[in-house]
Amino acid sequence: MQLVRRFRLPALFCALALLVCALLSRPYAETGVADDGLYIRIAQALAATGHIVYNGNTTPMLGWQLYLGAAFIKLFGFSFTAVRMSALLVAAVTAFVLQRTMVRAGLRERNATLCTLAVALCPLFLALSVTYMSDMFGLFAMVTCLYGCLRALETHSDRAAIGWLVFAVATNAVFGTARQIAWLGLLVMVPSTLYVLGWSSLPAGQKELHWHSVPTDRRRLLLAGLAADMAGGAFLLACMGWFLRQPYNVHESLLPKSFPVAHIIGQMAQLLLEAPFLLLPLFVLALPELRKSSPRVIGGLTLGYFLVGMHPFHPHPLFVLEPSCGDWVTPFGLFLSITNGEPPGYLSTAVRILLTVASVAGLIAWVACLIRNRREGRLAKDQPEGKWAAGLQAPTLQKSLSQRQLNLLLAPFTAAYLLLLVPRASSRMIDRYLLPLLVVAALWMGRYYQERLRERIPPAAWALMALMAVYSISMLHDGFSLHRAVVSLAAEVRSAGVPDTRVDYGWAYNFDVELRHSNHINEPAMALPAHAYKPAPQPPAGQCHAYFDDNTPHVHPLYGVSFTPNACAGPAPFAPVHFSRWPYRTPGTLYVVRYAPRAELPPGMP
């Protein structure tokens, strides 16, 4: 036991499990995946010139993420894979810190390990671990800040508490430069920690928090924490001031241009309904509790879900089926940027229905369990062994956080995060925005299950988590196999004398082609320099064209890549390229198709 505590073997196991699963998927392809190709090019320029130069389609600041990517380029030479390995390193460290965070939040080592793996090995987390998107770097900032806040709450020494608060602010300020929303740590999470610290110092029986009622020594702690947080806020403002002055980036607005209420509600519901699927090993833990709940409650919750599931803003024509958001984790596998033809399905409709039933049942079971426990009045007072708390009136900080303390720490952060998603929901929601919420949900469910249902999570959850890991590995493998096929197809077409600017290989690949001929993507939302955006002519109606063609004016495709040979104007005289699909024996196939009839192609084109 001392060896386990000294070397943090469960946390190391979580980090190594993530690394092994990621590497088993063979995550290499010399092309961009979604926006990460643009970010990789910025890191390449930083390694070569020592300067951060944005390229026209960047909303996150990227910050320290770029310096880490540039360091990997210096060490291993430039390749898309080398830069992506920096994200995998950060993901492994995040898994390690997350396991320790869950232990500090009151979970037993075994339960904390399973909850951590349920997050780290879910398809969304694993996919973002091996791409150079900013989500993983931002999540690392949030988890590190949460760990520092928990350590500040559990210590009995004011000096140590101040040290951990400074740690939380400093790490969140620096690591939050990769993704601005990660700064919710110092903007919301640290102030919430200070609030809980103030409550914890009140005399027993006092319910209202007043400055004069806080002991003098605890006032110094609160003032020191507030000063550290204000310093972090000043750093935040300075970084944003610098970012807003940089040319060729995109400035996000906190307020949506329009406020279509029904559409926003539908998009938010679609996003949140995917969480039970991504955390299926944890959501099904409450299924045995259904037999203890009122049939009337279960019936009402089921009806409510059906009403939400039948909203008109979801991709499936009849009902929300998992995965419901369908951007990074889709029924076809990893993120797709090819828009022609019907991609081979990864999850059949029958499997999707089964997953949806299991996810919905788990969600309803958890909600029914919460309602039943509240009705029965089972919330007990806080005990030294770590039972639930009805209040926070304690003369000193608890070593084990009460549930209400944990709620006060996590609830404001969750509410602020959801509020900042509203502008995105006014257009289209993306499933990777769920990543921080998955961490909060896993931590809360693990604590609730341990304290209110069973002391240990049953072995069946480990088996289900292993199945989810197998699904994540195979899905990720298929996605990168597809991207490698695109690179092979591009090499074949170039060898026939057709330049990349005349073929639509999918918008992620096209963005990289555009950057070979321009220093920025032609993005209309760019603020600086003025008039950098030049509207591109629209293709004729009904003719196939490149998706995001306005962003890539140097790409004038005569051909395109398709999953089916007869798309658009029919097949072009190029051999198709196959890509492997796990666990299927039949490979996927990519074809080159014409975007215009043969008679309309320029002379010399095949």
Image (cartoon, rainbow, N blue to C red):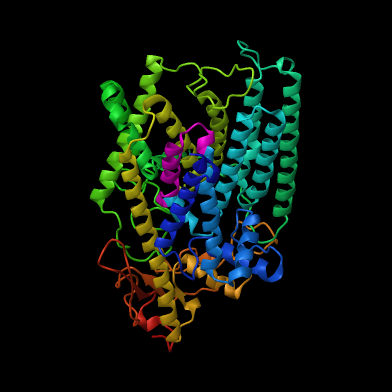
Q: How many marks?
A: 0
Is residue 42 shown to the viewer in this render?
no
Is residue 274 covered in magenta?
no
In the foreground, 96 or 5: 5
**Quadrant of the frame with the C terminus:** bottom left
Where is residue 531 drawn, in percent x and y?
Answer: 67, 63
In the foreground, 505 or 298: 298
For the magenta stretch, what is the residue range? Answer: 102-123
Compared across the picture, whether 598 is left or right of 243 comes to: left
Where is residue 598 drawn, in percent x and y?
Answer: 36, 82
Residue at (52%, 47%) from the top-left corner?
96
In the picture, residue 263 is in which quadrant?
A: top left
Image height of 133 relative to 435, above or below: below
Compared across the picture, whether 237 is left or right of 21 comes to: right
Q: Name, please, the residue furthest toward the front.
A: 2
Residue at (39%, 74%) from the top-left corner?
595
Residue at (33%, 30%) from the top-left corner?
365
In the picture, residue 127 is in which quadrant?
A: bottom left
Q: Name, please, the residue furthest toward the bottom.
A: 604
In the foreground, 591 or 491: 491
Image height of 386 relative to 124, above or below: above
Where is residue 422 drawn, in percent x and y?
Answer: 52, 40
Is residue 105 covered in magenta?
yes
In the foreground, 518 or 476: 476
Residue at (43%, 57%) from the top-left corner?
20
Is residue 590 shown to the viewer in this render?
yes
Q: Name, please, the residue furthest toward the left.
A: 350
State whether the magenta stretch is mostly helix, strand or loop. Answer: helix
Where is residue 397 drawn, in percent x and y?
Answer: 62, 24
In the picture, residue 604 is in which quadrant?
A: bottom left
